[in-house]
Amino acid sequence: MHAFTALLIQAIRIVFPDALVDVTIVRHTRLKARIDLEKGCHVDIFFREETQRIDYALICGGTRLFGLDNLKGWHYHPLEEPSQHILCAAPTPVQALAQIRDVYMQQEGDSVDED
């Protein structure tokens, strides 16, 4: 648990250095983290030590826009169709958060274009 927590906190500092972050350890075996972004968006991260389950999700307006998780093998949920599962290699926390940041920036750019 401590190893993943340390890697995650380091990754957050690298990828989202100015973001407000809340990390909670639940019952010593589960981690919940939330990275607050702008315009009603945030990143949710969950880790369960017993199963080694990891979930990363970009949430905007209460809807998952993009995510990565390792339920039944590593896969991501693409921006175009977040209910899909596309197999991928296991990302490091930095890689996962960088992908989420890139999707968030793309989403933000698209919403600016629509204004």
Image (spheres, rainbow, N blue to C red):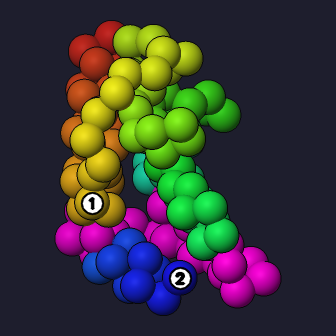
Query: What residue lies at 34% left-to-right and 27% top-to-bottom?
Result: 87
Query: What residue lies at 37% left-to-right and 22% top-to-bottom?
Result: 86
Q: Measured from the top left, where is residue 19 in percent x and y? A: 39, 66
Q: Nearer the viewer, residue 24 or 93?
A: 93
Q: Which mark is residue 92?
A: 1
Q: In this figure, which residue is indicated by the disc labeled 2?
A: 1
Q: Is residue 18 above or below residue 103?
A: below
- Quarter of the image where the C terminus is located: top left
Task: Check disc 1: other Cα within 10 Å, few if <14, some if 14-19, many if 20+.
Answer: few
What residue range appears in magenta? 11-36
**The magenta stretch spans residue 53:** no
Instruction: Evaluate whether residue 75 shows in this view.
Output: yes
Task: Give me the C-alpha separation between circle 1 and circle 2.
Answer: 15 Å
Query: What residue lies at 21% left-to-right and 71% top-to-bottom?
Result: 14
Q: Nearer the viewer, residue 66 or 3?
A: 3
Instruction: Evaluate whether residue 41 shows in this view.
Output: no
